[in-house]
């Protein structure tokens, strides 16, 4: 019953946001490249230093993220890169911490996450809403008890899945606050997000089973993103 | 409208927190709800069957990913009142994931009669065994039902790479040496039977030799092969009865009677 209410409320919120999406035109201006190009270039040494930073600077993550839960660790910290005309793509890498709970060892996880953010809606010049985020992430766990493909001791296709690699898909929403550039030198903006996700083994489990309900096979996560570049 | 959203979204999140949906990982080993089930249920079985000479029990297993079918089994079994207890022969889970153990536990806990669960090979995947040990207890255990000693063993040797003795002859020997009052008959239960690809087949006949030293050995029970089996594996009169998986919607009922006899039936639901 509780879940039904949440689902109804969720659908309502999503519908409201999609309606808003259709009526708002928006553009995202990224001016860091333009700024760099407009730097005064006086001699060949400066030119080479500038080129070097532009080249290697690309490897520095543009933002940091901190995520709680979502089947990729209790708490995950990572960074990533946004790209595309409207910065609609984001690729993240996370390291996650998984406490031992009822098992004997704490574990570390690694996650590669691909996000797609089709719409960015400015509420005013400080606040922005992204009504839909979606994507997938691959998660691996560092532990000897897990394997990527089953060891040779098993007959062929004995288990036919990997205990170590999980494929997750998600839907979510975000809200962003843009700092005033004159007061915040290092951070451009901060974003809070939540996601609803599931993974391959939960989908397989839910298949053909009315017993499993969305609260069983769906997971919730929340996170923060801090934009630096 | 957007200002309202600022309040609606956090409110939704708070609501969802209540439904326990912030999952850390499918293999996180984060167990909520009942733990140590086998020990508690064994106490119930021993108390309820004390002094009885006719014991009637049900045997099923391999319920992995068959949640609906297992739930139906629980309803059907609850409709009868002639069963003393239930043995789950293992493979509670398909992937060894923590939530799978809890989902299956919550279904099986719906049984009115007590049940015990054995460790299946799928339950050993990743850190599944640690979760099994927390929710159910040790993988080798024994209990008395009337004058029958049930010896439940981990026989999934392929999962353990010689890091553990499987089957554990020390445990079997200790159980044999116990001077249990009224121990007149013995029944063995295991997930995989000898000569299965999981069993340590080098010692299959040794295993058979040792279990025959137990007083009044009646028969052996196994799961794993997902079909009903009735086989005299060693041509020595000791029958191995295998239960089908839950997909087949059937279970076995054994009635052990005082005249040193027993009957079994396959119940389809």
Image: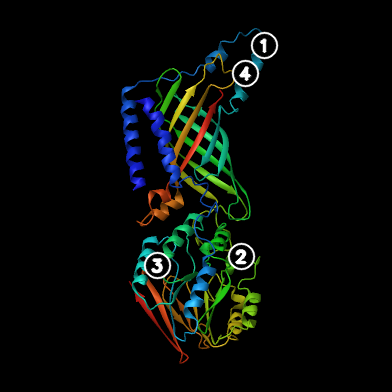
Residue receiving disc 1? A44
In the rendered image, residue A98, in percent from the top left (x then y), is placed at 58, 46
Q: Residue furthest right?
A: A45
User: Between B152 and A164, which is closer to the camera in this rendering?
Assistant: B152
**Could you give the CA–CA distance between mark 2 and mark 1, rounded to whole angstroms?**
66 Å
Residue receiving disc 3? B246
Query: In this picture, is A109 found above or below B244?
Result: above
Circles 4 and 1, Cβ within 8 Å, touching? The answer is no
User: Between A140 and A54, which is closer to the camera in this rendering?
Assistant: A140
In the rendered image, residue A193, in percent from the top left (x then y), is placed at 47, 33
Circles 2 and 1, Cβ within 8 Å, touching? The answer is no
Residue receiving disc 4? A51
Subunit of label 2: B
Residues packed near mark 2 inside 10 Å, few (<14), some (14 to 19) or many (20 plus): some
Q: Secondary structure at mark 4?
A: helix
Judged by depth in the image, the label closer to the viewer, 2 or 4, is 2
Image quadrant holding the C terminus of chain A, namely: top right
Judged by depth in the image, the label closer to the viewer, 2 or 1, is 2
Subunit of label 4: A
Q: Secondary structure at mark 2?
A: loop
Subunit of label 3: B
Number of the label disc, if any, that sits on residue B32: none
Residue receiving disc 2? B160
Residues at marks 2 and 3 on the same chain? yes
């Amino acid at each position: 019953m509780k879940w039904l209410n949440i689902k109804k409320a969720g659908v309502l919120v999503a519908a409201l946001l999609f309606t808003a999406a259709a009526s708002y035109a928006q553009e995202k201006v990224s001016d860091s490249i333009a700024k760099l190009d407009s730097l005064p270039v006086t001699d060949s040494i400066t030119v080479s230093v500038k080129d070097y930073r532009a080249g290697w600077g690309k490897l520095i993550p543009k933002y940091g993220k901190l995520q709680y839960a979502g089947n990729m660790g209790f708490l995950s910290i990572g960074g990533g890169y946004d790209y595309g005309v409207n910065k609609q793509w984001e690729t993240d890498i996370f390291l996650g911490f998984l406490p031992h709970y009822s098992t004997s060892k704490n574990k570390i996880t690694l996650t590669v996450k691909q996000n797609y953010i089709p719409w960015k809606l400015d509420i005013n010049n400080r606040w922005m809403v992204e009504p839909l985020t979606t994507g997938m992430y691959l998660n691996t766990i560092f532990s000897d008890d897990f394997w990527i493909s089953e060891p040779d001791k098993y007959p062929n296709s004995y288990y036919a899945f990997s205990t170590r690699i999980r494929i997750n898909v998600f839907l979510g929403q975000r809200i962003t606050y843009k700092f005033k550039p004159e007061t915040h030198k290092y951070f451009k903006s901060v974003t809070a997000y939540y996601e609803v996700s599931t993974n391959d083994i939960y989908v397989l489990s839910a298949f053909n089973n009315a017993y499993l309900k969305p609260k069983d096979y769906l997971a919730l996560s929340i996170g923060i993103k801090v934009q630096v570049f | 409208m957007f200002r309202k959203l600022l309040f609606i979204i956090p409110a939704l999140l708070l609501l969802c927190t209540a439904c326990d949906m912030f999952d850390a990982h499918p293999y996180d080993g984060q167990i909520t709800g009942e733990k140590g089930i086998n020990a508690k249920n064994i106490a119930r079985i021993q108390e309820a069957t004390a002094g009885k000479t006719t014991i009637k029990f049900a045997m099923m297993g391999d319920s992995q990913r068959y949640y609906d079918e297992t739930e139906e089994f629980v309803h059907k079994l609850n409709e009868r009142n002639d069963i003393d207890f239930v043995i789950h022969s293992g493979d509670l889970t398909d992937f060894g994931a923590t939530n799978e153990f809890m989902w299956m536990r919550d279904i099986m806990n719906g049984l009115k009669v007590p049940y015990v669960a054995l460790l299946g090979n799928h339950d050993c995947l990743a850190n599944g065994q640690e979760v099994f040990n927390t929710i159910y207890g040790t993988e080798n255990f024994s209990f008395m039902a009337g004058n029958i000693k049930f010896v439940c063993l981990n026989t999934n040797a392929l999962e353990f790479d010689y890091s553990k003795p499987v089957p554990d002859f020390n445990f079997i020997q200790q159980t044999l040496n116990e001077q249990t009052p009224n121990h007149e008959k013995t029944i063995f239960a295991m997930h995989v039977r000898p000569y299965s690809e999981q069993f340590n087949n080098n010692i299959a006949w040794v295993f058979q030799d040792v279990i025959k030293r137990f007083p009044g050995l009646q028969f052996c029970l196994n799961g794993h092969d997902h079909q009903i089996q009735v086989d005299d594996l060693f041509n020595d009169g000791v029958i191995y009865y295998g239960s089908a998986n839950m997909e087949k919607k059937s279970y076995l009922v054994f009635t052990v009677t005082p005249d040193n006899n027993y009957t079994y039936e396959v119940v389809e639901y």
